[in-house]
Image: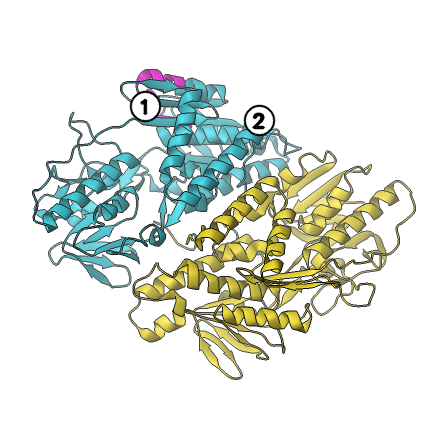
Chain colours: A yellow, B cyan
Amino acid sequence: MVILGAGFGGLSAAKALKNAPCDVVVIDRRNYHLFQPLLYQVATAALSPADIASPIRSILSRQRNARVLMARVTGIDAARRLVELEGGGAEPFDHLVVATGARHAYFGHDQWEAVAPGLKKIDDATDIRRRVLLAFEHAESTTEPEERRALLTFVVVGGGATGVEMAGAIAELAHWALADDFHAIDPTQARIVLVEAGPRLLPAFPPELAEHARQALVKLGVEVQLGHAVEECDSSGVKHRNERIPARTIVWAAGVQASPAAKWLKCEKDRAGRAIVADDLSVPGHPEIFVIGDTAAVNDPNGKPVPGIAPAAKQMGTYVGRLLAARLRAKAKPGPFRYRHDGSLATIGRNAAIADFGWIRLKGRLAWWLWGIAHIYFLIDFRGRLVVALQWLWSYLTYRRGARLITGGESDV
Amino acid sequence: MVILGAGFGGLSAAKALKNAPCDVVVIDRRNYHLFQPLLYQVATAALSPADIASPIRSILSRQRNARVLMARVTGIDAARRLVELEGGGAEPFDHLVVATGARHAYFGHDQWEAVAPGLKKIDDATDIRRRVLLAFEHAESTTEPEERRALLTFVVVGGGATGVEMAGAIAELAHWALADDFHAIDPTQARIVLVEAGPRLLPAFPPELAEHARQALVKLGVEVQLGHAVEECDSSGVKHRNERIPARTIVWAAGVQASPAAKWLKCEKDRAGRAIVADDLSVPGHPEIFVIGDTAAVNDPNGKPVPGIAPAAKQMGTYVGRLLAARLRAKAKPGPFRYRHDGSLATIGRNAAIADFGWIRLKGRLAWWLWGIAHIYFLIDFRGRLVVALQWLWSYLTYRRGARLITGGESDV
C-alpha cells in the first residue's frame, strides 16, 4: 500500500489504514505535513514555519504499519505497479493512493511566476515575507518619490480565499504592526490592491457574505478591483484593462494547477489537470489506483465539483482508506464517495470573517472567533496548537507581529 | 551619532543614548537583532528562527531619537566622516560606534566553509538544520552500509561553548527526538564526534568544570577527541593525525574572525582581526570613533582579553553610550572601560550544564535550570520569552523537537 503525498488527504488515508492488515508506505518530497490554510500567516509574519508544520515521521510514529519515505516522485508505471523516484529508485505497490495536491497556475504565463510568487509551500511563504518586509525597508531608504510609491504598493491577484486573506493580512501588517517603526515613510499610506477577474470575491460563498468581505477589506484600506483580468505582470508592476499599477510586490493567488498525477497515470483530466476518477475515487481501468484531494476531479451529490479544501481532501482520504481496509479483509465495498460540505470559512482580518454553514450564515466578530477556534482545533499537533494560540493572543493584544524576519535570498555575510 | 550593527553591543549603545541630545542612526544589514547564544537550538530543531530574533525597528520604536537603516556597510571614510553603504549611498557621522561582530574563521582554509558551515546567522542555522535532518532521511533510504554509516556520522569541530552545545544537541536529537521515527536505521546508533585541537574543552572554564562537561557529553553518547587539529575537511569527511572520519555532516565551531572594521579604519588589529582600541574603546587617533563587542580587542583589569560573549558586548555598548552622552552634555568623561565578568554558563544537554561565577561553581541539573532561566530572562522581547519557555517546557516533557523542518536549498516544486 503506497500513498503519495502527506497532505490532508494522504495522512487521512494512512490513518484510516491503521488497523488494516497491510504495510503503508507514505512518500513525500518534504519531511513535514503543512497546515496550508494558515500559510498566509507565515507570509505576513504572524506565525513561524514550524508553527504550522509537523514532521510526517512524528505524526505517524505510533502507527506501526506505516513507513515514511522522503523522496521525490517522477512518475508512475501503472502496468508494472511501480512508483518511480528521483535518483533512479522505485517503490512497488499493490494499491496506490495519489494525493499529491496542486500548485498555482499562471494560465500560460509561466514567466510571471518570478515576479508574482504564489503561496503553496513554506519556502513560498518565507519568500513572500522577505519581499513584503524588504519593500518597506527599501521604501524607507530610497529618496525617489515614484520608486517609493511603487515599493509601497502591494498587488494581490485573485479574489478567492487565499487572495482575500493575503490582502487583509498585508493591510493589517502595514497599518498596525509596522505603523510606528519607520521615519521616512508612513506604512499606513501603503496601497494594497486586490485584483479579481470575476465580478465578485469569494465565489464559493453566498453573494451577501462575499459583499460583506469586500466591505471589510475596504474598511481595512484595501482597494478591491473586480472584473479586471491581469494582462501583464513584470518587475515594474501589474497591468489590466483600466490601469497600470506600478508595484514592486505582487502575490499570485489566482489559479490552481493539479500535480501531474493524471499525466503520470495517462488518464483523463479536467482543465485544471485534475484526474477524472470513478465514483469510488479509483482511476478508470485501474481499480488498484486512487486519486484524492486537490489532484482529483470529483462531483458532490448535487453535481457540483468538490472544492479544493482541506475537509474535502480529508473525507476522500478517509473514504479510500476504509475502502481499502474493507477490500483487504474481503468485506463488502462501501458505496460511492459522497462529499459532505460542513461549511465555508474565510477570514479578512481582526474581528472580520465570514462563515457559511448552509443553515446559518455568520459574519464579523463571531465568525472571526469561530475561524480562530476551528483552525487551532484542526492544527495537527498539540504543540502547534498551543504555540499558535499563544502567538495569536499576543498579536491580538499588542497589534504586533512576531515573525518579522527577512531571511534567505542572500548570497552571504 | 551612527551605530553600525544591532547586536548586543550596538543595541546597548543605542539604548544608553536614549536621553542624549542627539540623533542615533542604527545601521544593520539585517532587519532583526539575533539572540545568538540560542542559535544552536535553531540548528538542532528545538526553536524557530523567529523565537530568537526581534525586528530592530520594534526594539527601538519607542526611542524617539533613534532611526534604523537596513543597509550593508562597505567601508568607513574616517577622514570625511562617512559610512559607505552598498549601492553607493553614504551616511555622515559626527560620532561612530562600530559593533559589527565576528564570523567564523577557517584558518586559511576558506574552501572548508562549503562542507563545514559555521553558526553565526539564522540562515547558517536553518542550513545546518537541513543538513542534519536530511542526513537521517538519506540514511533511511540508502541501501549501502558504508554510505549509511557516513550519513549517520556527525562531526563538530571546535570544543568551545558552541561546539559543546552543538554536539550535545545533535546527540539529544538523534538519541531521543528521532529515536522512534525511522524503520531502516536506528538514530540512536548515530556517531557524534567532537574534535578539539587543544588539550581540553571549554578553555574559558576551570578544568574541573570542563572535565564535567566532557563526561556529560560522553554520557550523552558523544565521542570527544582532544588534541587533534583537523587537517582536512571535504565532502567525504574530516581527517586529523590519528583518524580519517567519513562523515556527511560537519559543523564548524572552531575559530572566530572579526568583521573587517579594523581594515575599514586602517587601525592596528590582533590576530583575529579585532581592532586594538584605547582604554575608552576609541580608535587611537580618532576620539570620535569607537569599536566594541567582538570587533574590539580589549583587556580586562587583570590583563586578560575580554571574552567574545554577549555580556561583554553589552557592557562595552553601555559604556560608550554613556561616554558619548557625557561628552555631548560637556560633562566629565567617565574613567577607562573596565570589564566586569559576571560568570560563565555552558549547557551540554538535558539536566547537564556548568556554571562558574568565580565565588561559586555549579554543575549538573542546578546549573542547567539556571542556564535556562538566565537565557529566557535575557531574551529580548516579551513574546520571545513566552514562546521559548513554552517550547522548552514542551520539549522537556515530551523529549520531542518542534522545529524539525527541512526548508530551503531546493530549486523548486
The region drawn magenta spans B194-212
Residue B64 rendering spot, x and y as whole percentages? 26, 56
Farthest-out residue, front: A366
Mark 1 — residue?
Answer: B198
In what element is the residue under mark 2? helix
Question: What residue is shown at x 31% (from left), y 26% (from top)?
Answer: B344
Q: Along the polypeptide, which appears first: circle 2 or circle 1?
A: 2
Question: What residue is shown at x 79% (from left), y 46% (from top)?
Answer: A321
Disc 2 crowd, CA 10 A, few/some/many (<14, 14-19, 20+): some
> Position of B261 compared to B34: left or right?
left
Q: Is residue A313 magenta?
A: no
Q: Quadrant of the N terminus of chain B?
A: bottom left
Residue B156 rendering spot, x and y as whole percentages? 42, 31
Mark 2 — residue?
Answer: B188
Q: Is residue B206 magenta?
A: yes
B15 relative to A186, above or below = above
The one nearer the camera, A98 or B53, is B53
